[in-house]
Amino acid sequence: MLNRRKFGRMIGAAAAAGVAASSPAPGAPAKKPNFLLLLADDMGFSDAGCYGGEIETPNLDRLASQGLRFTQMYSTARCGPSRNCLMTGYYAQQTAVDIMTPGNVPDFVQFAPEVLKPLGYRSYHSGKWHLRFVTGEGGVGFDHSYTLMDEDRYFTPKSLLLDGEKLPQPKIEDHYYTTSAIADRAVGFLKEHARDHAADPFLMYFAPHSPHFPLQAPAEDIEKYKDKFAEGWDTAREVKLARMKRMGLVNCELAPLEPNMWTPWNTPDAELLAKIGPGEVTRAVHWSTLNPDQKALQRTKMAIHAAMITRMDTEIGKLLDQLKAMDAERDTVVIFLSDNGASSEQLIRGDGHDSSSPLGSASSFLGLGPGWASNSNAPFRLHKSWVNEGGIASPMIVRWPAGIREQNKLRHDPCHFVDILPTFLDLAGGNAAKGIAGRSLAPAFQKDGAAPHDFIYFNHNDNRALRVGDQKVIATGKTGDWELYDMAKDRSEQHNLAGAKAETMKTMAAKWKQIDEGFVRQRESAKPTTKRRMPVAG
């Protein structure tokens, strides 16, 4: 395997930033493990109960009690780039694979199913896609894929594919709900694997759409939470922070609400109020400033968000039950993540919002909004699309009975989505490609602090950041000044040290630029890849 390089050497002309997977941890079983990768969509760092949240997530909580919780796992702040990192081990700026990065997809890019197949793995996908390669036109090697291409509807999605072939659109009378359907397909793939390929290890990539907007959930799930959030997001955030500190998850202050920060691509305020009604709130203001109509709508929106997460947790339970039924529980590495922080976006998309319909139904198109998103991301600052901690901090739960001895423990290693594929390769006995950005987290499965990074890089929507050790520099937007924060004490990013440590700030900002420019050169100098079709399993 490749040797780990020092930070300065890693930032070469191509900014390869590569570190290979480590050798398997001492005592790890010789049998190749299975991999169950669970990826939520727009779920906040502290939504789940095991991360201090008030939402019922008994299956995630059980996974956490039987394994590890990482407190400093990072996404890219957006759905597409995060999925690219998971599937390739490269930063999105290296590969142009996600739909938000310009340029050609380099020929060196390989996806998780392609690199695991030579090691004997079969790979399955069920859920959201959101990569430039589209299943059936440029698939990436999954033996089966149930693919959601419609992000605007939970009950009647218009674009569903099975192994690249388009499926009929579900109707309301079908009682279809994407989260449940995605889980049922995943369970079906696992049952087929147990029947026909039991001797082979597998990767199961389960990617439900929940709780991404629009806020839509079965009525009975929403009913569970109808009176849950009447106290409002100010009180909820304060109570949550105290709980998270007791759990050892954070040691920082609570970031204040920022009513002047919002996503510019939101549906205009006047249109939101006209279509949704006077109860809509478009800024992260204090709960005490809301009138009764606003409070009623806002707590209902959080109830739907919570219902979507609890439903996802229930469906995850089906997959965990299937692992047990096929006698694969002990030998399966289960990893749960969220592709970015909770979203403050408020977009009326899909079929448009019908204000006369029950909230959360198929005709209702609401976004969580910045107030409750601030609670979901508490105690951190801001939301999805920003590279502040609220946009990039992801929960990460890892359970592997055969390979992780400790249970209900925390890991504080800073890590990134690019590390997931190198970890899989490490545990499977393979080698990470030269120049891959991630490194194996397997050492951290055995000991806290055993998987250090030389740096972690961020770039999305002109929001830029670099973390080296406990130091993080960040600049917001094209013209934003660089700021410097100490992550060991201040993950809520309240105490800018750029003035007191100007040289550190300048050095790190220069390194970010060097890395970023190297990634662009690496991407643009590579040959474009040829299209690859997804094979249909036979």
Image (tube, rainbow, N blue to C red):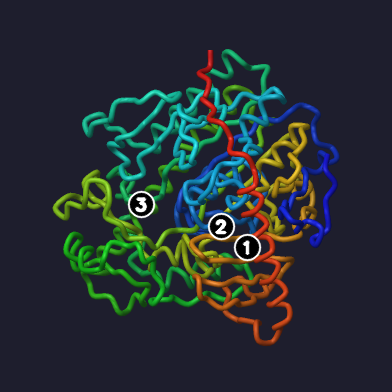
Task: Tell me the CA gap for discs 2 and 3.
Answer: 22 Å
Instruction: Identify the image quadrant of residue 221.
Output: top left
Q: Position of residue 365 (x, y in %)?
A: 26, 52
Is the residue under label 1 in contact with that under label 3 (CB below 8 Å)?
no
Label 1 element class = loop
Looking at the image, tell me whether mark 1 or mark 2 is earlier in sequence order.
Answer: 2
Looking at the image, tell me whether mark 3 or mark 1 is earlier in sequence order.
Answer: 3
Quarter the N terminus occupies: top right
Task: Tell me the CA gap for discs 1 and 2.
Answer: 7 Å
Q: Residue at x 56, y 31 (%)?
A: 530
Q: Is residue 245 above or below residue 189?
A: below
Label 3 belongs to which residue? 213
Q: Position of residue 467 (x, y in %)?
A: 68, 65
Amino acid type shown at disc 3: Phe
Camera-nearest label, 2 or 3:
3
Q: As drawn, is 282 to the left or to the right of 471?
A: left
For the view shown, which residue lies furthest in the bottom direction?
500
**Label 2 neighbour load within 10 Å: few <14, some 14-19, many 20+:** many
Q: Residue 51: which disc?
A: 2
Task: Tell me the CA gap for discs 3 and 1.
Answer: 27 Å
Q: Residue at x 44, y 42 (%)?
A: 312
122, 115: nearer the viewer: 115
Label 1 belongs to which residue? 249
**Label 3 neighbour load within 10 Å: few <14, some 14-19, many 20+:** many
Is the residue under label 2 in contact with that under label 1 (CB below 8 Å)?
yes
Label 3 element class = loop
